[in-house]
Image: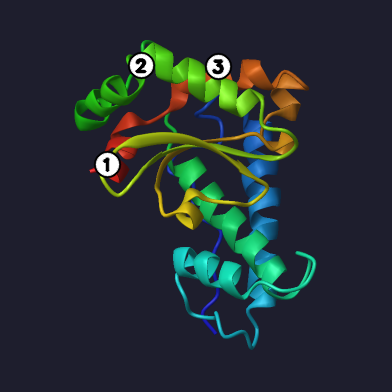
Amino acid sequence: MEKFQLMALPYAPEALGPVISKETIAFHHGKHLAGYVNNLNGLLEGSPLSGLPLEEMVLKAERLRVGDGTSGMGGMLNNAGQILNHNLYFAQFAAPKADNKPIRKLAEAIVRDFGSFEAFKVEFQKKGATLFGSGWVWLSADKDGNLVITQEPNAANPIQKGLKPLLTFDVWEHAYYLDYQNRRPDHLAALWQIVDWAVIEQRYV
């Protein structure tokens, strides 16, 4: 059975500081994401989902889900979903940059659908700050290219709603607690400095 591997970061662990510290990267990527990878590989032994890409696995596991979310398809959905989410999350960042803004077609679509980049940021941060418990806030595109912001609890991903995920902020506490303690809104506001908009643009087009 071909096993999933922990994704390699496209930057040094300290590159995102002070927005995200080297210590947070070590725990978030090196412990939490690695744990999901190991868990999923264990669950795939003898599974009919073995060999599928992550996106297909998430969609199929949701349809076949049974149990209480800790074993069987529920456990597979949670771990595959978290790997998919985290792979998109960690790949979308670069070293902090002042006046960091979206580019090209995505920039035009954000103005079209939200009025301005600033208005988009306000709504995105609000959705992230008000998501109860653990989860993710996402910018996605529908089949017509229109942009939407969604709150996804726990390990959920917008592909389960027929959307194309573009940008995400992780609001599980392990994503920010070492650096920001309980100040989730401060964490969300700081993340704009490290978004690699070229990556998000590639996902959109």
CA gap between label 2 and label 1 equals 17 Å
Q: Secondary structure at mark 1?
A: loop
* Marks 2, 1: nearer the viewer: 1
* Marks 3, 1: nearer the viewer: 1
Q: Residues within 10 Å of mark 2 (few under 14, many from 20)?
A: some
Please state if 27 lies on the left or on the right of 160 as rendered: right
Q: Position of residue 8 (x, y in %)?
A: 49, 52
* Type of the residue with mark 1: Gly
On screen, 36 above or below 74?
A: above
Q: Which mark is residue 189?
A: 3
Q: Secondary structure at mark 2?
A: helix
Residue at 55 percent across and 48 percent down: it is 86
Q: Read off the residue under disc 2.
A: 117
Look at the image and tell me whether residue 18 can be seen: no
CA gap between label 3 and label 1 equals 26 Å
* Type of the residue with mark 2: Phe
Residue at 36 percent across and 11 percent down: it is 99
